[in-house]
Amino acid sequence: MKIAPSILSADFANLLQDVKEIEEDADLLHIDVMDGHFVPNITIGSVVVKALRQYTSLPFDVHLMIENPDLYIEDFVKAGADIITVHQEACVHLHRTIQRIKGHEVKAGVALNPATPLETLKYILEYVDLVLVMTVNPGFGGQKFIDSMLKKIKELDEMRKEMNLSFEIEVDGGINIKNIKQVVEAGADIIVAGSAIFESPDPSSTIKEFREAVGT
Ligand SMILES: O=C(CO)[C@@H](O)[C@H](O)COP(=O)(O)O
Ligand SMILES: [Fe+2]
């Protein structure tokens, strides 16, 4: 299991300090990019990713919650993204968008909102490196995990086995020390957590507790 702290819940006035605090314990840094159109919130853009890139070697896991992601892929690649994930709901030509990301030699992911069926990914799964299952409606940190998403993670894991594919399953939203084990048992490989890590008194110990809770 990999842990990807989401900087959405970090202190933006002390962003580097917060990243440094989790650097040794985290596997990836999850960066939520929101445009105020696809989701009702505006967060950070490629300039912030580029600024952070100079100070950490953690792989950057960029979650684009934006319309027309094709227009910005190159900017995020140049800024230092290692994984770029786009939403199925935001891409009219998803296959083209995934190929565009992979053409830059970074990993390509596709994200699904809670209400979007897995079946919409049937013909794209063989091309992606990662599927991000949203377990809250995207836009904000600190929301409650939607329980029915456990079934979705399990079904995706089954599809992966049946299709003999090796994409990673990433899960994002409302994950904490109480539900992490269930999420991993359902089939998740990468756990994103924002508020549970950055709003805890000791973010680095919280990551260690997450690993202990899962038994890894
Ligand atoms: O993409 C998103 C929200 O849209 C997430 O990455 C959040 O940042 C997760 O925050 P928590 O639910 O863990 O507080
Ligand atoms: Fe995210």
Image (cartoon, rainbow, N blue to C red):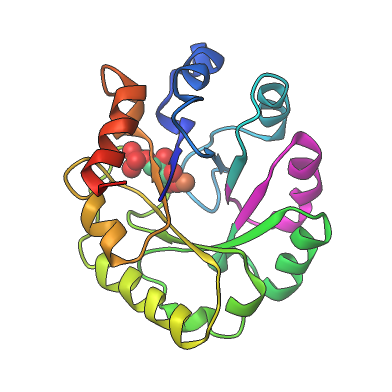
Looking at the image, residue 143 lies above or below residue 49: below
Q: Residue 139: in sight, yes or no?
A: no
Identify the residue at image location x=47%, y=78%.
Answer: 160
Q: Quadrant of ligand 1?
A: top left
198 left or right, relative to 179: right
Which quarter of the picture shows residue 204?
top left
Q: Position of residue 85 (x, y in %)?
A: 60, 55
Residue 146 highlighted magenta (yes or no): no
Q: Nearer the viewer, residue 58 or 66?
A: 58
Residue 82 highlighted magenta (yes or no): yes
Number of on-image labels: 0
Q: Position of residue 28 (x, y in %)?
A: 53, 39
Q: Which residues are magenta?
A: 63-85
Q: Position of residue 177 (x, y in %)?
A: 21, 40
Q: Position of residue 97 (x, y in %)?
A: 73, 66
Identify the residue at image location x=76%, y=35%.
Answer: 79
Name the residue at the left extreme: 178
Q: Residue 188: in sight, yes or no?
A: yes
Identify the residue at image location x=58%, y=77%.
Answer: 125
Looking at the image, residue 95 lies above or below residue 215: below
34 left or right, relative to 173: right
Which quarter of the picture shows residue 70?
bottom right
Identify the residue at image location x=45%, y=24%.
Answer: 22
